[in-house]
Amino acid sequence: MRKYNAPKVKESRGIQILTTIWLVPLIAFIIAIWLAFQYYAKVGSTVTIKFESNVGLVENQSPIKMRDVSVGIVKKISLSEDGKGVLIKARMNKEVSDYLNGKAKFWIVHADVGSHGVSGLDTIVSGSYIALHSKKEEETVSDFIGLEDPFIDTEAKGKYYLLSAPATNDITEGSNIYYRMYKIGRVERVGISPDGKHINFTVFVEDKYTSFVNKKSLFYTRSNFEFDFSRGKLDFNIANLSQIVHGGISIYTPSQTLNEKHPIKADHVFPLYKSLAEMKAKHLGTGEGNKIYKLAFNESILKLEIGSPIEFKGFQVGYVTDIESHYNNETMQVESNVYALMHTKAFEESNSSVKGEEALEKLVANGLRAKLNTALPVVGSQFIDLVIDRNQSIYITKTEPYHTFPTVQSSPKSDILGEVNSLLVKLQKLPLENLLNSLTGMVNENRKPINHLLVDLDKTIKTFDTTINNLNKITSSEELAQLPQTINHTLFELESTLKEVQNLTKSYGDSSKFSDQLSSTLETLAEALKSIERTNRMLDRNSNALILGDD
């Protein structure tokens, strides 16, 4: 039987650590170490940010951005210990470690949908995130207080301006600023004034466009839809999508002031008009030296509204802020207190040290009064007109909390509607039916005489028509039409005869009796000739003059 060679196995007598089977896990371990190193090399410190509330932030998802670059991520969201806010723990990238110092500012960026449009459009898809603004410093901190409003960088290349208006006019943070329909800036901040009387706006204009803004500039809210029918044709404009979404403010600067120096003080506040039409209206001292006065009226103010203007010599110097009315049992009338905000600076003289409020008090002492007026009779709304009335000396009553401004009764105006109504009532009271019945009876009783009168009148009219026709026939005859020509021919022959007679008289002496008689005869003929000439001219003008007269 044949034998095969069996394999020889060498018996291992030692411990083998590094074998090929350990190569794969070793490589995997090295890769894991490398990845861990890479991760921790990029990961910076953990920071805690406190906000009043969480607006759309999600753990392990919402990023932290600086100049639209992701530099961290939200890791945990929890309530603060006092329950008055939320704590955000975020892991920051190592590359921004030097920015986590006392100058760091955090705020939440989120989508805001309202009547003014949409803000934070980039967060609709990606969600809310935390924005960071800071500068490098060596000392770092880990606890921060977040801002509830977007941070305004006062060191940006441009200028900030302050605006004020009675309402927001649908302007919000992020709204655009336009100059000649070109975007030059944005609205950075919108908020209520500390006294609660106005809405304050902080707007930013880029540095290269600041030369177009000076003290003479006017700011107004742009309309998304504009109609114009002033030139006989309809002009309809729709704003661009950016303005419809964000809203917008336009700046109007008079062209003649662009090359002049009109410096703006740091605390100067521009009024923000609610529309282009309001900006075009005439104003005095708008937005400066505001003071609220109380005005008492004992007459109808049904057409006076909150926001109605206060005018002085055709210029608007304020507006109505509130109206309070009550019934007086003693006078049996409705009495009203109107609170009016006046721009006292409008009454300052250009080269005088007297302040606006003092100047207004002097005007009142000289007869300035407040009176109700109406723009259009019957249908027009009321406004308050400041007029001069020197019938009595009255001063501003300095009561608290508002000074009382003197008023004067408006002159009575004719009530057209009331007069028409009174006339209709009188017509209704007239015995028209009895009058008609009496008139009908009178006509019936005198029907026969009236009929005879009408018959005679008809005959007279027919006779007159016949006479007129006969006259027309006479005046239209050819003989009468040729009468002026016949007279002219006769005059020509008469002139020839007179010339022959004149030649005959030359054969007699000037002192002869025949010459005297002949001269007298010629004078008579001359007078007759003049009369005939006048008649001829009359017939030339009107061939019917011999019959109808020369009228």
Image (cartoon, rainbow, N blue to C red):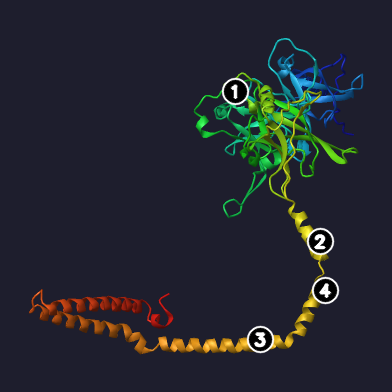
First along the sequence among labels 4 and 1: 1
Which disc, if any, is residue 76?
Answer: none
Alpha carbon distance from label 4 to label 1: 82 Å
On the rendered structure, is 158 left or right of 483?
A: right
Q: Position of residue 291 (x, y in %)?
A: 73, 26
Amino acid at dot 1: Ile
User: In which quadrant of the rendered view does residue 509 lie?
Assistant: bottom left
Camera sees residue 315:
yes
Alpha carbon distance from label 3 to label 4: 27 Å
Q: Which residue is mark 1?
A: 264
Q: Position of residue 197 (x, y in %)?
A: 76, 29
Alpha carbon distance from label 2 to label 3: 40 Å
Q: Which residue is mark 4?
A: 434
Which disc, if any, is residue 453?
Answer: 3
Amino acid at dot 2: Val
First along the sequence among labels 1 and 2: 1
Give the label, 3 or 4, closer to the camera: 3
Amino acid at dot 4: Asn
Alpha carbon distance from label 1 to label 2: 65 Å
First along the sequence among labels 4 and 2: 2
State which quarter of the image contains the C terminus. Answer: bottom left
Amino acid at dot 3: Leu
Q: Which residue is mark 2?
A: 425
**Secondary structure at numbered mark 1:** loop
Camera sees residue 67:
no
